[in-house]
Image (spheres, rainbow, N blue to C red):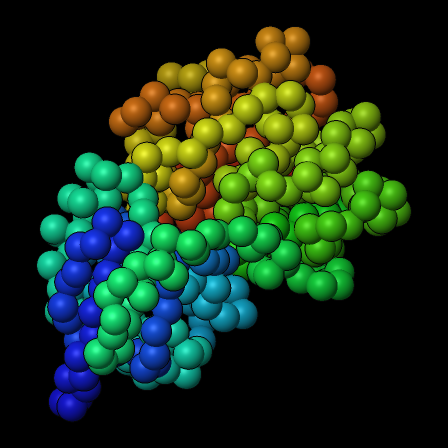
């Protein structure tokens, strides 16, 4: 059993303090406090680059019961600023288990806190909205910490998580060449494309339209990623140029938002976002509701999409926000949720097949 009983505190921007115990790396960290309702897939959650600059709260009370491994990560590290759980499992059990979550966080230098009331914390965020906070190890000066917390801003995060140079991933019996724009992509997006016969070239977020078209892509995939979509002016301007090229395009999460902004639509920050593996979404064309995996704090304003440019294709079943757009001015469609869903439900993986059809289907 662990002797990890060191004191740690979670301080919120409104002055609320939770006293708990530290796990993972020892130290202090600040970030935007968000919560996810996912019951499994905690390693995929931790390694999702979309959490860059945020401290993740797991609403499920026991985390780490099946351990960690080298297969499940969705990126090369952890971009999140910190981790909050009610309880972590010290003796995980699973045939794939290669270690415990405490050791994993230590290895990747991620500060965590446990033994706090995560239900109370989640209620605060739901009522007040997402707010900044900090995990502090040991003693602290509250006023000094609050000053730093309130000054914190999640900004310039896409550049932190994107590749610096293009990377190539070939498929067996490849039929298509796809450029995957990396705004903080999850590995399973690439895997879903490769297993469908796509050679994938991962390009940095700031690649120019000329550099992208020089790859002679049959299609362009716009990935998920962190932060305020409107801050990414370079990527938005690039997508605006690419619209004229009429290359089949599929966007997920941040990619969905960026293409909407490039087409003259607007985005808005949600009160506490949609994060978890149980979010209902209605596909308007199919008149079916699917359970989806989501992780976003911003949404496209459905009514802001110019009617001659595109139309809302998917709607969130809980709050009615826009969850997808099908475009009329280009062979393109985008969704706010994660059809690659790893971990999460696989209900909407059919969208990858639609993308394949858009690129030529029987090619």
Q: How many marks?
A: 0
Could you say which quadrant of the image residue 326 lies in?
A: top right
87 relative to 24, above or below: above
Q: Is residue 334 above or below residue 117?
A: above
Give the quadrant of residue 274.
Answer: top left
Front one among 296 and 126: 126
At a point 42% along the width and 79% down the height, the residue shown is 109
Asked if residue 301 lies left or right of residue 278, the reply is right
In the image, 176 versus 246, the foreground residue is: 246
Quarter of the image with the C terminus in it: top right
| Residue 54 at x, y percent in the picture | 40, 56
In the rendering, at what x and y percent does residue 332 appear? Answer: 65, 27
Asked if 304 appears above or below 68 in the picture, the reply is above
Screen quadrant of the N terminus: bottom left
Residue 68, percent from left and from top:
34, 74
**Residue furthest top as drawn:** 307
Image-quadrant location for residue 104: bottom left
User: Is residue 137 toward the left or the right of residue 153 in the image?
Assistant: left
Residue drawn at (15%, 71%) of the image = 20
Q: Residue at x 81, y 45 (%)?
A: 208
Taking the image as shown, residue 352 lies to the left or right of residue 10, namely right
Residue at x 85% of width, y 48% of height: 211
Side of 25 relative to 222 (left or right): left
Say whether residue 271 is visible: yes
Q: Position of residue 162 (x, y in %)?
A: 63, 58
Residue 324 in sight in this render: no
């Amino acid at each position: 059993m662990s002797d990890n009983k060191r004191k740690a505190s979670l301080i919120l921007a409104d002055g609320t303090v939770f006293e708990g115990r530290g796990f993972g790396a020892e130290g202090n960290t600040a970030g935007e406090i968000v919560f996810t309702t996912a019951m499994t897939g905690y390693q995929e959650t931790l390694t999702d680059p979309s959490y860059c600059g945020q401290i993740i709260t797991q609403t499920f009370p026991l985390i780490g019961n099946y351990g960690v491994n080298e297969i499940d990560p969705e990126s090369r590290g952890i971009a999140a600023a910190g981790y909050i759980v009610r309880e972590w499992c010290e003796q995980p059990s699973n045939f794939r288990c290669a270690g415990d979550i405490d050791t994993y966080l230590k290895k990747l230098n991620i500060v965590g806190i446990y033994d706090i009331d995560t239900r109370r914390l989640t209620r605060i965020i739901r009522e007040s909205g997402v707010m900044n906070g900090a995990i502090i190890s040991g003693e602290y000066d509250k006023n000094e910490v609050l000053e730093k917390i309130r000054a914190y801003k999640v900004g310039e995060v896409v550049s932190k998580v994107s590749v610096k140079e293009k990377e190539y991933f070939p498929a067996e019996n490849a039929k298509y060449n796809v450029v995957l724009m990396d705004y903080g992509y999850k590995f399973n997006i690439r895997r879903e494309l490769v297993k469908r016969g796509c050679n994938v070239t991962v390009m940095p977020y700031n690649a120019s339209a000329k550099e992208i078209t020089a790859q002679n892509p049959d299609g362009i995939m716009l990935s998920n990623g962190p932060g305020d979509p409107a801050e990414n002016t370079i990527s938005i301007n690039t997508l605006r140029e690419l619209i004229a090229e009429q290359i089949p395009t599929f966007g997920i999460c941040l990619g969905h938002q960026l293409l909407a902004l490039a087409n003259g639509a607007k985005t808005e920050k949600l009160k506490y976002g949609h994060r978890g593996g149980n979010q209902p979404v209605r596909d308007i064309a199919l008149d079916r509701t699917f359970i989806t995996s989501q992780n976003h704090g911003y949404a496209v304003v459905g009514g802001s999409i110019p009617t001659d440019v595109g139309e809302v294709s998917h709607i969130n079943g809980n709050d009615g926000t826009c969850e997808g757009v099908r475009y009329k001015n280009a062979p393109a469609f985008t969704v706010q949720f994660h059809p690659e869903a790893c971990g999460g439900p696989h209900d909407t993986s059919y969208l990858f097949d639609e993308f394949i059809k858009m690129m030529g289907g029987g090619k």
